[in-house]
Image (tube, rainbow, N blue to C red):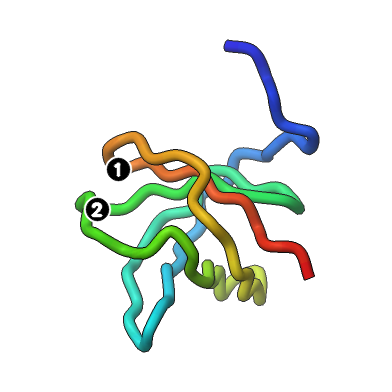
């Protein structure tokens, strides 16, 4: 598979949450870079295309948007600003 990312992601295994409108859905962060992440959720529940990814162990609260979805895996791009 051809790598198309500007900044390579590093494999990680961290707990996180998807936060939006006062809701929180647990997720596992599978890879992480300064510009995005790949997360895994337990069930393909609905959630918006824009939300905040929280990774407590990193002290990270990043607004982001969904780039792709593949069953339980989701590719994210962090919003700039």
Question: How far across and down, in percent of the image, does residue 38 sit?
Answer: 52, 44
Question: How far across and down, in percent of the image, does residue 77 sit?
Answer: 62, 51
How packed mark 2 is, by other alpha carbons closer than 10 Å (few <14, some 14-19, many 20 or more), is: few
Residue 78 versus residue 12 in the image, above or below? below
Residue 54 versus residue 5 in the image, above or below? below
Q: Which residue does the image show at 72% across and 51% down from the upper left? A: 35
How far is mark 1 from mark 2, CA to CA? Answer: 7 Å
Of residues 14 and 48, the one drawn nearer to the viewer in this rendering: 48
Q: State yes or no: discs 1 and 2 in contact (Cβ < 8 Å).
A: yes
- Considering every residue shown, the one lying at the far top of the view is 1
* 59 relative to 31 in the view: left or right: right
What SS does tag 1 mark?
loop
Specify the quadrant that holds the C terminus: bottom right
Q: Which residue does the image show at 42% across and 68% down from the upper left? A: 18
Residue that carries the numbered disc 2 in the rendered image: 42
- Considering every residue shown, the one lying at the far front of the view is 49
Q: Mark 1 or mark 2, which has the lower sequence index?
A: 2
How packed mark 1 is, by other alpha carbons closer than 10 Å (few <14, some 14-19, many 20 or more), is: few
Q: Which residue does the image show at 23% across and 50% down from the upper left? A: 44
Label placed on residue 72: 1
Q: Which residue does the image show at 68% across and 38% down from the upper left? A: 9
What SS does tag 2 mark?
loop
Question: How far across and down, in percent of the image, does residue 59 sit?
Answer: 66, 76
């Amino acid at each position: 598979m051809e790598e198309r990312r500007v900044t390579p992601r590093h494999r990680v295994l961290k707990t996180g949450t998807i936060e939006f409108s006062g809701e929180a859905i647990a997720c596992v962060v599978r890879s992480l870079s300064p510009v995005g992440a790949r997360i895994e959720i337990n069930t393909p529940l609905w959630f918006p295309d824009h939300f905040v990814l929280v990774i407590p162990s990193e002290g990270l609260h990043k607004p982001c948007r969904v780039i792709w979805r593949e069953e339980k895996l989701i590719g994210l791009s962090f919003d700039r600003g």
